[in-house]
Structure formats: C-alpha cells, structure tokens
Amino acid sequence: MIVHEDVICSFCGCLCDDLTVEVEDNQVKRVKHSCRLGASKLMGHDRIKTPMIRQNGELTEVSYQEAYDKAAEILLRAKHPLLYGWASTVCEAQKKGILLAEEVGGILDSTATVCHGPSVIGIEEKGLAGATLGQVKNRADLLVFWGCNPAEAHPRHTLRYSSNVCGKFTSEGRKCKKVIVVDVRETRTSKNADKFIRLKPGSDYEVISALRMILSGKAEILPDEIGGVSKAELISLVELLKSAKFGALFFGLGVTHSRGRYKNIDNALSLIAELNAQTKFIIQPMRGHYNVAGIGQVAAWETGFPMAIDFSRGMPYFNPGETAACDVLARQDTDAALVIAADPASNFPRSVVEYLAKIPVIQIDPHENPTTFLADVVIPSAVAGIEAEGTAYRMDGMSLRVKKIVESSYPSDEEVVHNIIASVRRLRSNVIVEGGT
Amino acid sequence: MRTIIIRLIHSIQISLEAESISPDKFAPLTLSQINALEIWQGNRKMKLEDFFQVDGDEGSAKTEDMFVRLEGDFSRIKRLVEGMSNGIVEVYGNVGMHAGAKMKGGILRIMGDASDWLGREMQGGKITVSGNVGNYAGSGYRGEKCGMRGGEVEIHGNAGALLGEHMCGGSIFVHGDVGDFPGSLNQGGTIIIGGSTYLPGAEMGNGTITIKGPARLLPSYQQLEIVDIEGIKYRKYVGDLVENGKGELFLAEAQSS
Amino acid sequence: MIIRGGIIYDPTNGIFGEEMDLCIEKGRVVEDAKGEEIDARGLLVMPGGVDAHSHIAGGKVNTGRIMRPDDSRSGVEPRTRVCRPSTGYTVPNCYAIGYRYAKLGYTTAFEAATPIISARHTHEELEEIPIVDKGALTLFGNNWQVMESVRDKDIAKLSAFIAWGLRAARGYGVKIVNPGGGEAWGFGSNVKGIHDTVPNFDITPADIIRGLAQANEMLRLPHSIHLHFNNLGKPGNYATAIETLELLKDIKPSRMRQVVHVAHMQFSAYGGTSWRDFESKAPAIADYMNQNSHATMDMGQLLFGSATTMTADAPLEYSNARLTHNKWSNLDLELEEASGVVPMIYFRKALVNAIQWAIGLELALLTKDSWKVLMTTDHPNGSPFVNYPEVISLLMSKPKRDAEMATLHEQVSKRTVLANVDRELDWGDITVMTRAAPARVLGLEDKGHLGIGADADIAIYDLKPEDVDPSMDYQLVKKAMATTKYTIKSGLIVAKQGEILAVPEGRTYWVDASVPKADMDRLMIDLNEKFEKYYSIRLSNYMVQDAYIPNPAVIKAGLELESGSLVKEVA
C-alpha cells in the first residue's frame, strides 16, 4: 500500500490540498480528511472504457486514432464549432484547447457560462476586491454568505478557510467570528449563522442598493421595507458590516443566476469597494468546479479574455450574450460541439440539449454522463488529479499542481486534445476541406 | 441618389458577419465589386454574392447619396451597416445582432425586429425599428465606460433588457415595454419609455429617463416634485443616489407604485 | 552569421558608434563566424534591449486583462503562420508581449513583482511569452517571516529565507514594495513613513529595508534590492525617497553594482503638500543621485493616454480608484503581500498628469550618469512598453519636448524645470539606458553588450546614425525605434521589419542561493509552523515545481561559494 500525503482534491473550487490517499494495486482504497464529495470523486466510479464513434445510431468501439481523426474531421467541417467545458480539467489541457479552437476557428467557452459567468461580467464593470482564502482564515472576523450554501456545496470551506477555522488574528476560531447568511431560503449554512436575512427572490439588487444607501448616510430616503427586509434590519446589518475588522463576503449562484444576474454582482462589488473606505472588506465568488477559475486565467493570458471567445475570424472576439456556449446553442448558431469535462446535457435547458443532439458532438471525459448519449465521438481520458498531473486554480486564484497518484492506461485530457490538433493539422494538409481556415 | 438593393437568396443557418453591407463600403464600388465584398460565415470567408443578389444603380456615388434597400430575413446577419456615416438604409425584414453599431450618421430604418446590441456605441445618425428589439440596444461594449454617445433610436415595439447601458449621449425612444435595467450606469442621454420597465437608471450618474407605463423603481431614487410634461403629470426623481447620481427620472403619476 | 558594416553601440565595451562586423555562432557573439550575412551597412546596431522593470506576467497582469475587455479588444491581430493572435494595448496577452518586445528590439524582460505564493501562476504566463528571455523579481517586503527575522535582528535567518523564497518562487531578486504597508493593508490601513510602526510586528519599514539590503548583500545576489518606496504616488514623497536612500548609504555592495535599485522613480519624486500645489522634485532627486553612487533607478515615465496601474502597493491602488472613480481590483495574499489594479487615463490637459510626464524626463536628463537611470514606463503603469520609442525621442530632442510642452498647462513650466533643460541624450546614452545599464543593474553578465561571449541578442534599426539628427528628426527616430530592421535573439532572426519570423522559447533566469544548513534548519522550524497554522496551502504543495521552468537559466549565489567564483564583474 502506498500512502500519498497532501493530495489535492480535484472536486470543487476549494481545491483542498491536505488529503491523505491510500493506494493499493493501483487503486484508491481510502481517502482521509476530505469531504464526502471529494472522497467520492477520488474513489472513482464507472468509466468509459474505450473510444467510440456513433455508427448507424450506435456507439461503436474504435481505436484512439480513429476517434481523433473523426473528431478532427467534424471540427474541420464545421463553420462555427463550439469547444465547451474545460472546468474539470487541468490548465495544460485548457491551453491545448485554446490552440485547437484557434486552429479550427471555433468558439471556446467554459462552464462559467452556467455558473459564475455573470460574476466575470460584473468584474469587467467594477473590478473585484479579493483576498486569498488564507488571508480570510487569518483575519476575517465577519463572514457573509450571500446566495451560497457552502455546507452543502463546498463542505470544507468553513473548516479550512472561513467561519470555523483558527488563524493568526482569529485564534479562537468560530467564537471570535460572526457569520451572516443572506438567502431566499433557509439552508444548512443559514442554520449555523449568527444572523440570517431572508430576501424575497429576485430582490438582491435592490437590497444591495439599500445597503449602499445606508452606508453612505442616506437611509432616510429608503422605504421602510426592501426585498422583504425591514429598513431597520438592513441598518443593523450595515452596522455589523462596518464593525468588522476584516469582513469577507462569499457569494454563489443564488446571486449570479437570480433576476439581475451580473448587475447583482456589479452592485455588490461597489458595496465592497465602499465598505473599504470604513473598514476592511473583501468579496469572492464560490467557484464550483475545481478548475473553473483556471480556464478563466488561462484564457485571459492566452487570448486577453476569460471565456466565451470566438476565434472564427482568426482572432479572439469576446462578447458573452453572443459568444457564450448557451448563446450559440440557443440561437442554433453552431454546427458541431466538442465537450470536455462537462455535461451540458444535464445542465443546459431542454431546447438547447435538443439542438445539441442534432449536431455532431465530440465528448472527452473519463466518465459516462447524459452528454454521452448524444455524442457522436466519445474519447475516454484519464482523471486529472488522480491519474494525471497538472495545474489548477483555486476559487481565490491560487494555483496548485494536482498530482498523479495512480497509473492509468487512458491518455490525459492534454494528450487527447494534443492528438486531435495533430489530426486536424494532418487532415487539413491532406484533404481539401471546403472553405477551410 | 444611387440605389442598391440587396436580397437574401439563401436561408442562413450559421450567422453571417456582414459589416461590409454599408453605404460607406458600397459608395465607391461598382455592382460587381459589391458582389465580391467579404462576408464571414463562421470561420469561412465568403463573398457577398454567395448569399445575396445585388441590384441597383451602377457606378460610384458619395456616401450621402446612397440609398440601400435590404430585403429578406436578415435576423441571422450581424453587424449590418456597422460604422455607417451617411446615406439611407432601409431593411424590409428583421436584422441580427449589432445592427447600426458604431453608427456615425445617416438613417437606418428597420421594418421588422432587431436583435441585441442595436446601435451599440452609436455616435450619430438615426435608427428606427418598427418592431421589437433585443437586449442592450444603444449600450456599450463589455468593460467600456461609454455606450451610445449620440444619435437617435426610435423603437415602435418593445425592447429587451439593459437598454442604453452606459449611455453617454443621444436619445432612445421606446414606444412599448422595456426589460430590466434600462439606462444603467448612464452618464448622459435621454431615454423615453412608453410602456413598463423594471429598475431603470441603476447607478445612473447623469441623463434623463421618462417612463409612461408602470415601473418598479430602485430604493436609491429620491422623489422630488410633481411636474407636468406635455399635459401628463410625472413624479420626478433624482438618482441613482448610490453613486451620488444627478440623473433625472420621470414616472407618469398614474403609474407610480 | 555575420552582421556586416553596422554602426555599433556597445557602451559596456567602450564602443560608441563604430562601424564593425559582428560574428555570431551558437547563439553567442564570437570572434569569427561563417554562414548567413546580414547587410547592416551604416545602420544603428545595439545589443538587444533589456527591460528590468515591467509587469508582464502573473496574477495582477491577468486581473488587468480580465477586468479590461475594453483594453483587450484593442490591438487585436490575427494568427499568422508563426504567431498566435495578439490582443490588448496596456494589458496585452502573453503572445503579444513577446512579439511586441521583439519588434522593438528588446530580447529580455523581467516581471517586476511576484509574490512567492502566486509564483507558479507567474511562471505559467512567462512560459507562454515567446522569444524574450525573462525572469521575475520576488516580493519580500511584507512577508511575515521577513518581518519576524528583522524584528529578531537575525540576518542569517533572513538570508536563509530569501534563498528559500527565491527557490520556492524561482525568483531572480529581492523586490520590496511599500514595506510594511501591505501588512497594514491586511486590516485596511497603511504605513505613512519609513519610521512608522508596522501593525502587529513591532518594526518599521526602515528596519525591513535595511534588513533585506543586508541579507541581499550577505547572499551576494546578482541584483540588489529592488525597491518601491513607501508613500509612492503621493505629493511630497520625494522626502521619503531621499530619507530611504540615506538609510542604505553605509551598506557595502557584495558585487560591482548598486546597493539599491529604485523602481519607477517618477512616482516618488513629488513635491507639494496636496494635488493642488503638486510640483516636481526631480531636481532634488537628481542632485542626490549625482552626489551618491549606491543607487540606480528607472524612470517610470508616464505618457498621456491609456494605462493600467498595477502594483503590490494595494493601499495606493485603493486611493487611485477612489480618486478616479474607476474599476478597482485587489488581492491580499496571506502572510506575504497585497496587490491592486486600476485602469487609468493620463490626460494631457490635466495639470497633475502633465507634471508627472515632465518629472520622468527631468529625472533622466538631470541625472548626469546614464548608467544610473534605466528607461522604463513601469509598463503598464505609466504607459505600455510599446511606447518606449516616444520616450527615446523625447530624451533625444529638446525641440520635441518644447513642442509637447506647448500643448500642456502653462503651470507645467513653473512647477517643473523641464523647459530649462537643454540636454539631449545621444545614442550612447540611449543604449546605456535601454540595454547596458539594465543588464548591469540586474547582474546579467551576458546581456546588454556585444563583447565576445555575450548572448547574440542584437537589434538592428533602420536608421543611419550618421545621417540623422535626433534633435531635429525626432519623428524619424521614433519611427525607427518602433520597428527594428532585424531583431536577433540567441543568434536567430526573430523579427524583420516588424514581421515575426520565428518564435523560439526564451529562458527563465532564477537565482539559486546557498546558505549554511544550520540557518536553513532554523528557518524551517519557523516555516513549518507557519504552514501548519496560517497558510491555506501545504508546504509540500507550495514550491514552484520544475515543470514550470522548462528553460531555466540558473545563476548561483550565496554564502557557501568562494567569492572568487561569484564576482565576475562586467568590464
């Protein structure tokens, strides 16, 4: 048995790096220190066994090379291919993905389109005042969880980084911290909060505006109730925020995907900037997939833009609302899709999935998921963080190198994309594909 | 006047980028040169004649003497008349995204619906739409401080969300209803909304928004006096006070809630 | 390869405009060579440019890109046979950085500020920057371990930590930004001067600066400490600048170089008590530089137009954001640093901006010895580096400066002395400030000159020094400096008349300093405790792995080596 220490969990954006994993006969036998979500991922589950191509409606086993060539052919034939996913794989694969998108003149987009895409647009309006999770651990005496539920979605966030951890200036842990939850419903997180503020659904923007008004001394202009919360309660909330030595606001999809979307984030970013005139405050999105932050970083340094990048004219063009995966699928403005480390068939609206079923789809994934059933080429890959190493970015932008702890006969995502690029280059020089880029 | 008529002869699946369809581009060109103009369909560089039939007057003309008539469903054709500086363009049909973006002058008349980003970063000229428009009409580009700076947009139907976001000048008149957050982050300009809307003028620094139908207002607007404009009584508000804004918002009194 | 007949400027080797052939083999300048010949008859030939202070890679830079799609959409160029697409102006993508430096004739660029904890990210970006050789300076000025060792007056342990930190970050040298201020920012405050107490650590910025300078020299690092002063960007801060430089006067350099390099002096040469009576104190700074020889500086020239300010001086960025009501990004990094990013437009018509513009030029022109002044714009804080040709033409031409001054607020000529400065730099000065001096300041022995054995990094400009009067023909100078006729990197033609022909991977310099094992052992006790209790990352996952430095160029330094093997001075 081999015991691996300080293994990095490749499940959620917390990217916990303190797991102990016991491996026997090249299989993960036991995972210690992780949450159940992380353990479940590391323990592994059913795998796609071989590459497959759909022939006469049935997925049929083929060689890797045949699958790469078929994928390349689909991408080269397409006038506006979409290369989507990238959140649950490592930066090395993402870099290759951007090169592939350039080579085939396609759109590259990440799963941020269905999670924190609106946060990114908010940041483009206002910038974001953040801190690493260790800074929060050491200093934060006030934590606000707004429209997020770490107790369910990021189970170790509170234990490692935020409300229930001791740090240099927070040596008494939970006892020396206040926890506020703002949400439209009670959650496991709100049950452990010192204060729970329940909003009417869709009223986040107005409530944030009200907080900004109170903060700047204009409370008297406000009505008596905003978003289902009394003005008096909001005033006491602002007093609490101002009393923090170091406040940290974490937000989730409850804010980014409720009415107002990126405007909610935009407004919250301004609230935090203004709070800094009176005390110390930071704000961070609770990123979901373990490397969804990474695709944003990689795409930004490679192309200048963090997501939704259309290379069809040979240079990056970015305009979420037009070039995001959900946009082009909803408008039926793409004619082939490569899906890697994602499951749009489960996460996208039904009409979009129906369209996806009509166009050629290439799937790269270690595991079968509903997207497999509409895929025309299926390429199984190694699980990054278990069977392949590489870089991942935590939700606060800190990068870590995830490890290889078991051997695998599957190629890594990076190798798969690399090989598709090779097939694209070969096919393009051998075969005259109509138009071509 | 030199008239050019462009008819769509194929149905379009993957949208086209057709900034070359513009009086400025057409003015100096012969018909056969117009036929050869570059149009992109996804990653394929094509020619205008691959999708369109071009008719009209031969020879070159000044831009201000150009009359361009587009016939057919242009709803999957983006960037029509981008940066247009003069002349008249009439579209008999719907138009796709970014129609009239960065327009500097001239007239664009759309007898149909328009998609998102109509008149994005518009500087001058006039756009009229007989039908509805999508989101972000008269807005800016992501991350920019300034959207529409000048010119006029008139929409006879309804408009989507984020109408005139980051508007710095010019005017937008929507006869129908408008989606969420019109006039947000505005630094100037005028927006008139005939119907309903939701949270207008968020973080507006300057500018005017007049709303004749029902609207939900932000709590960060302060109500001032009642004013009479063209026989209609309006409640006047100032905001957005979260930004110490001096924007003026008029809400027809019958509709105030 | 032989470059025939160029007019060579190689100040390091005492060559100022001599017609000479240059021979290149295996990426180095040699006595004699065969092969391809480049006709450079009469053309200006210099060593490849070296940028010792530029923000080109890492978290801050990428934050700038992410918050500025408005910037990224400018400067877009499609992919070519050899190039990836370029985007951006003040915050270009990695590829554009490499291509644009190469087109300017620059072949080396150093990222100026990398926190150890995010160095992996910096190297991921550096790896993607094509063509140029690069390195990254490592931030130490607000690090808990540094402050504790300084408090304990344990310079040996501090030296061990610097050695460890440079290895952990694969860093090149000791960067200090607003020492103590970053720690104070952790609870939203700042330090106001070098004798202010840093909250919770019972030391002062002065203690940190002196301690790090002493440790830097104890380790015989190739570069000196590289210092961004306290109070940077504030009216009246020239006093802090001089006070800080005085602190370091008695420290002996361990190599033939300065004891301190001052980053972007323009931002620290301010007089006045507020923005209302703001004025230049460049003459006072230049006087100090002329009378003392322990310091070098870079200009941090500001040019009118778009910029993106980014610095580890996080409180400064917060005031920038409040002042301009602009977008503001911030990132505090646990136990180490903070940082901020704010887009900026400098207006010709704004008096403060115009005075800032003049200050950078005054510093360069009033400091007599060009070896003490590196030309930078603190990219992209003062302006993006693509505007270096504008700075060069301003330095070389009084008529150009006068023409510019005529468009500025009349107060500029009262609050600065620039109008009265007649000095015009010559090609020798320019070569020093853009190549020879940056290489010497950094301690890069094979860069910045064309002596035998030097790296064959060469810029050939389409300008005949004998036919051009830079004072009058400043437009021609600017145009010629913007695009080389040839840029040669390690003996390979990478750019020709603005076209990128080849995209070799550059090397990444880092410094491997050795220290006595006993000191390292003592240090590790401290560090283990910090990683157990305070860091959110495990020690074993913290260090930058080899995989991120595919083309390393390691410079050895430290205590255990014979001094003779270390001090190989540049002539």
Image: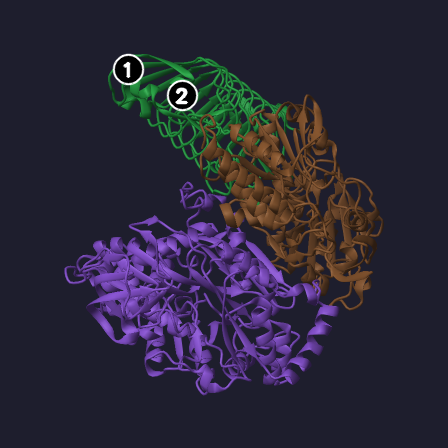
Q: Chain coloured purple: which letter?
A: C
- Image height of A70 relative to C298, above or below: above
Looking at the rendered structure, the kind of residue marked 1 is Arg
The amino acid beneath tag 2 is: Leu
Task: Characterize the local packing of mark 2: few (<14), some (14-19) or many (20 or more) Cα atoms within 10 angstroms.
Answer: many
Q: CA distance from mark 1 to mark 2?
A: 16 Å
Residue sitting at 80 percent across and 64 percent down? Answer: A173
Disc assigned to residue B2:
1
- Give the color of chain B as drawn: green
Q: Which chain is brown?
A: A
The answer to whether residue A86 of the structure is visible from this angle is yes
Above or below, comparing residue A298 to residue A276 in the picture: above
Residue nearer the viewer, C486 or C307: C486
Residue A307: x and y in percent read 57, 41
From the viewer's side, name the closer residue of A322 and C67: A322
Which residue is drawn at the image coordinates 60% and 54% (left, top)?
A129
